[in-house]
Image (tube, rainbow, N blue to C red):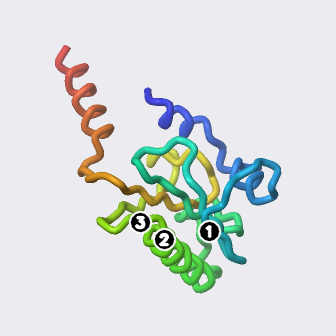
Amino acid sequence: MSSEVEKAQKAAPSGDTIFGKILRKEIPCDFIYEDEKCVAFHDVSPQAPTHFLVIPRKRITMLSEVKPEDEDEEEALLGHLLLVGKKVAKRIGLTNGYRVVINNGKDAGQSVYHLHLHFLGGRQMKWPPESLVIKIKLRTIGEIY
């Protein structure tokens, strides 16, 4: 099992997160963007030459946990997060494209239960991601033997 999968399986959807500590400035972090609704910073474990996160200041555990009564407010926030990511990507030179990823729950590999958007670029992306192809091949080999 990869370390990202292990982190996701162990992560708890309740309680404090590393992002909460970053937002409260208990853990130092160099923001590459900051406003009243969100912050952006480089991922500490980049999966591409350029990999940054955009997170809301408001704690939303995961996308599927947005409550119907909050949808209008959350839709505006989600749109804002995407537009901030677009602005940051342009500012740091991701002119040839980038991938946007939201992991929702442990099966998707969510390892921090505070909604966050990954922006990855700086190289040609493949689909499915190479790590997924390797996992499928290993599983198939295991089933054969």
Is 88 rendered above or below residue 18? Answer: below
Callout 3 amino acid: Gly
Q: Residue drawn 25% across and 19% down?
A: 142
Quadrant holding the C terminus: top left
On the image, the x and y values in percent for residue 86 come to: 45, 73
Mark 3 surroundings: few (<14), some (14-19) or many (≥20) residues within 10 A: few
Q: CA distance from mark 2 to mark 1?
A: 10 Å
Kindly check if marks 2 and 3 are in contact, taking CB atoms under 8 A apart as contact: yes
Compared across the picture, whether 39 is left or right of 95 comes to: right
Nearest the viewer among 66 and 101 is 101
Compared across the picture, whether 39 is left or right of 123 comes to: right
Compared across the picture, whether 38 is left or right of 135 comes to: right
The residue to which callout 2 is attached is 91
On the image, the x and y values in percent for residue 104 come to: 49, 56
Q: Residue drawn 54% across and 65% down?
A: 63
Q: Quadrant of residue 77?
A: bottom right
Callout 2 amino acid: Arg
Q: Secondary structure at mark 2?
A: helix
Mark nearest the camera among 2 and 1 is: 2
Kindly check if marks 2 and 1 are in contact, taking CB atoms under 8 A apart as contact: yes
Is 95 rendered above or below residue 108? Answer: below
Mark 2 or 1, nearer chain start? 1
Q: CA distance from mark 3 to mark 1?
A: 14 Å
Q: Residue drawn 51% across and 79% down?
A: 79
Q: Give the number of the disc on residue 93.
A: 3
Callout 1 amino acid: Tyr
Q: Give the number of the disc on residue 10.
A: none
Kindly check if marks 3 and 1 are in contact, taking CB atoms under 8 A apart as contact: no
On the image, the x and y values in percent for residue 64 come to: 53, 64
The residue to which callout 1 is attached is 33
Q: Secondary structure at mark 1?
A: strand
